[in-house]
Image: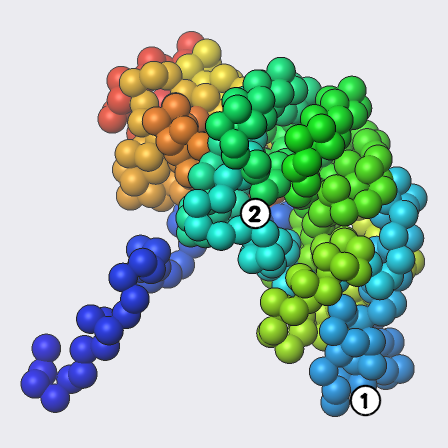
Amino acid sequence: MPADTFDVLPLLRPDLPPPAIRWNGSPEFNLVGGHNDADSVPVDGLIEAATRALKREGRTLSMYGLHSGPLGYRPLREFIARKLERDAGIRCTPDEVLITSGSLQGLDLVNGVFLSPGDTVIVEDMNYAGTLSRLKRCGADIVGIPLDQDGMRMDALEAALADLARRGVRPKFIYTIPTVQNPTATVMSMERRARLLELAQHHGVPIFEDECYADLTWDGVRPQALRGMAGDDRVVHIGSFSKTIAPALRVGYLVASWPLMSRILALKTDGGTGALEQMVLAEYCSTHFDTHVRALRKTLRHKVDILMDALRHSFGASATFEDPAGGIFLWVRVPKQVDTSKLAQVALQAGVAINPGAEWMTDAEVGRRWLRVCFAHPEEAVLRNGVARLAEVCRREFDVPAAAGGVHR
């Protein structure tokens, strides 16, 4: 380092996360992240919506909040309130909806108002990596609850809550992704939703409900949201347009009544979520959302069928998975000799990017046998060839048996 170069790194706070990796372009076979189908982005509709909205209200961009206040663009909040009542059974006013910069900001805001270091949070043991990393960064004590095809297991939750109560610990909230869970893509049954509300009420623990994928069930049937069943701030609800319209728009939302919303809003000091994005979404979604999502579901259903066929062809019985109920991910279990954290490193060198399961489970050791595959964005050839390349790496590096009849390259 030249003598006249100032080294700022020693001055950084010691509890920062690891440094980011420099981006060097997308891998040849990109099977990670929450990306969506490129051909399904309604580009023409968004262009028309942007033109109409800007011609009509463009001058309001001169003000923070677009004359709608700090909660976000009112026509978009009105659309969300109508949609949530119709599809999720949530009755809320537009003034109980906060527009956020993606659901991730909603996560940060809820964590910010509830959590101090050392607080306890209950989650599904297979879970969104962004949630787990944020909870760890808050210094939370994370209690993982197993789940099956019907969602979080209520017998295990009841036992965990009872054990915590005996130790004098009251969790700050129960975080759940009940509809198209991430990463398992399961849907919590109505019986378990009712029992979850009973247990939470009995122990005086609120529920934090994340429903970012709830519109993407294959049959289009969305169970009533926990917030709708409870009807009050026993449940804080968040959702997103990232998975239904486009992730790069970075628009999500949070539902809470004013006593809690006023505390959440006090932490949202960013000057407001992107105004143009809100205007365009409100204009587009008011007339095109349902038609668009119906078509998107068909596309995603077709793509996951391709992925599952590719896995059967290239891995045979070595890779196991359940047909997901919807969404954009497949949760895959691999043989015990495969460490998916190591697999992710060697596979990337071969041009295949995967999400290792250790990042998506409260027990990282158990997670080493799992990986999450995003099927929404890659084209068919990328899915098939990427899975074949991944199988080759598994055979070479971990002695995974070749699939009977599989193609070897």
Q: What element carries label 2?
A: loop
- Crowding at mark 1 (Cα within 10 Å: few <14, some 14-19, many 20+): few
The reply to whether dot 1 and dot 2 touch (C-beta < 8 Å) is no
User: Could you tell me which residue is drawn at 81 percent across and 49 percent down?
Assistant: 292
Q: Tag on residue 242?
A: none
Q: What residue type is labelled 2?
A: Gly
For the point 44% across and 45% down, which residue is it?
118
Residue 21 is at least partly visible in this image = no
Q: Choose between 177 and 250: the one closer to the eye.
A: 177
Please state which of residues 283 and 159 is positioned toward the viewer in this rendering. Answer: 159
Question: The residue under label 1 is which amino acid type?
Answer: Arg
Q: Where is residue 288 in the image (x, y as percent from the top left)?
A: 87, 55
Report the quarter where the C terminus lies: top left
Residue 343 at least partly seen? yes
Q: Name the residue under label 1.
A: 59
Measuring from the top left, give residue 317's x and y in whole percent: 46, 11
Tell me the SS state at disc 1. Answer: helix
Q: Position of residue 7 (x, y in %)?
A: 18, 78
Question: Residue at coordinates 80% horizontally, 71% vertically from top-left?
Answer: 73
| Crowding near the residue tagged with mark 2, few <14, some 14–19, many ≥20 C-alpha atoms within 10 Å | some
Question: Residue 299's quadrant in the figure?
Answer: top right
Q: On screen, 158 above or below 12?
A: above
**Mark 1 or 2, nearer chain start:** 2
Quadrant hosting residue 267: bottom right
- What residue sits right under mark 2 in the picture? 34
Left or right of 74 on screen, residue 340: left
Name the residue at 75% across, 78% down. 65
Residue 43 on image: x %, y %: 73, 62
Return the residue found at the far left: 3
Left or right of 371 in this view: 220: right
